[in-house]
Image (cartoon, helix red, strand yellow):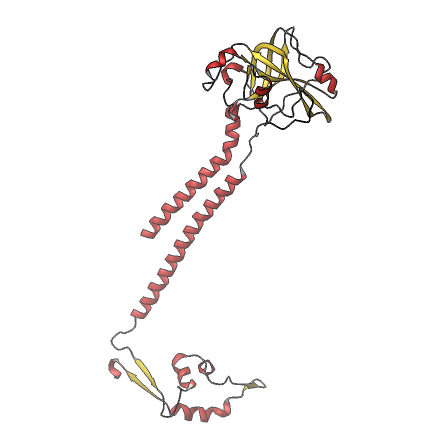
């Protein structure tokens, strides 16, 4: 009963761990559902300048107002739209009522807060380099894109970079403070909208975050814990079975008369180096050849050992078996 209690505790733990892994396997879907990235949020409520952007904000839809900074612009080559290779035009945009993160320095008030915005795509390099945003107020709905890592672009013409990296943009525009992300507009209104203008094509927002799904690694761990639970029950069953068989054998041996039990001592005849195999066969019930005798040969379906019966009997008579113990001592 003690071992059964221990096994039940182990099985409960294993099943609990399996259920925990199942919850982890479903966590990816829960995280995506809880993000509510499809709901449009005020930009200043979810983003702060000079602060890290949580990964959960990737693809978040936002609304904001502000104005372009036409001279603070970069062109990103090597981009593809509908199978055509070309250039992105990325212009800095100053949101109204922008907020700074807690890590901003004391001199942040002397700088303009701006975020990179993807204004459009073109396959022509000259069109990309000459395009400029208009001046004036703009209202925009956009999707937050995760910032890209910096890439070396020493071989590129002035004004071009290989990635939308805020670390590079800060070096290019030292009078600006920016965000750890950029915006991909869905629509813009106002006289200075400037989205997909001057020969630029509209770049539709795309989902970049993990769309969820069942985590197969956690599911595999859940199955393993169930296997461990089954193994614990199987081992306990084997121990119970072995104990039952041992008790049964002990009961069978105890059922014999312990007082009048016969014990035999086999004594070799004088001059013999070993006990006769036939004598041992009579005591153990095993064939004589299992005790060293020659295995009998058969011929035409009959035993070939019939002619040796007399010699076997003679040898057997030369060996004494003396009962000892009990009433036969």
Q: Nearer the viewer, residue 274 or 61?
A: 61
Question: Residue visible at 45% across and 41% down?
Answer: 18
- Quarter holding the C terminus is bottom left
Q: Quadrant of residue 282?
A: bottom left
Label total for image: 0
Question: Residue visible at 54% across and 22% down?
Answer: 180
Question: Is residue 1 among the parts visible in the rendering?
Answer: no
Question: Residue visible at 37% across and 63% down?
Answer: 245
Would you say 90 lies left or right of 41 here? right
Spot occupied by residue 273 in the image (x, y as percentages of width and height): 40, 88
Q: Nearer the viewer, residue 93 or 6?
A: 93
Q: Nearer the viewer, residue 224 or 207?
A: 207
Would you say 183 lies left or right of 198 here? left
Spot occupied by residue 74 in the image (x, y as percentages of width and height): 65, 19
Spot occupied by residue 1 in the image (x, y as percentages of width and height): 32, 52
Question: Is residue 176 among the parts visible in the rendering?
Answer: yes
Spot occupied by residue 72 in the image (x, y as percentages of width and height): 62, 14
Location of residue 157 with respect to 66 vertically, above or below: below
């Amino acid at each position: 009963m003690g071992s059964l209690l221990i096994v039940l505790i182990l099985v409960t733990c294993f099943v609990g761990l399996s259920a925990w892994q199942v919850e982890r396997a479903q966590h990816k879907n829960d995280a995506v559902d809880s993000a509510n990235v499809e709901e449009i949020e005020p930009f200043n409520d979810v983003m702060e300048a000079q602060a890290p952007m949580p990964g959960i904000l990737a693809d978040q839809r936002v609304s904001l107002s502000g104005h372009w900074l036409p001279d603070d612009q970069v062109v990103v080559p090597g981009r593809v739209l509908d199978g055509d290779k070309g250039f992105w035009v990325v212009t800095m945009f100053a949101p109204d009522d922008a907020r700074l993160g807690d890590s901003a320095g004391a001199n942040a008030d002397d700088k303009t807060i701006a975020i990179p915005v993807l204004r459009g795509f073109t396959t022509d390099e000259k069109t990309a380099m000459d395009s400029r945003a208009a001046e004036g107020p703009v209202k925009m709905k956009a999707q937050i894109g995760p910032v890209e890592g910096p890439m070396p672009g020493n071989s590129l013409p002035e004004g071009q970079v290989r990635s939308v990296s805020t670390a590079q943009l800060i070096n290019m525009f030292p009078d600006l403070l920016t965000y750890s992300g950029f915006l991909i507009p869905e629509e813009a209104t106002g006289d200075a909208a400037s989205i997909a203008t001057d020969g630029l094509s509209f770049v539709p927002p795309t989902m970049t975050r993990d769309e969820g799904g069942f985590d197969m690694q956690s599911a595999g761990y859940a199955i393993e814990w169930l296997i461990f639970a089954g193994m614990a029950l199987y081992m306990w069953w084997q121990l119970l079975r072995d104990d039952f068989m041992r008790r049964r054998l002990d009961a069978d041996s105890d059922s014999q008369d312990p007082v009048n039990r016969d014990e035999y001592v086999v004594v070799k005849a004088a001059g013999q180096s070993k006990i006769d195999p036939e004598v041992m066969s009579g005591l153990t019930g095993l064939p004589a050849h299992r005790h060293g005798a020659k295995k009998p040969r058969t011929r035409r379906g009959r035993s070939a050992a019939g002619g040796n019966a007399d010699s076997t009997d003679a040898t057997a008579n030369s060996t004494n078996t003396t009962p000892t113990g009990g009433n036969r001592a």
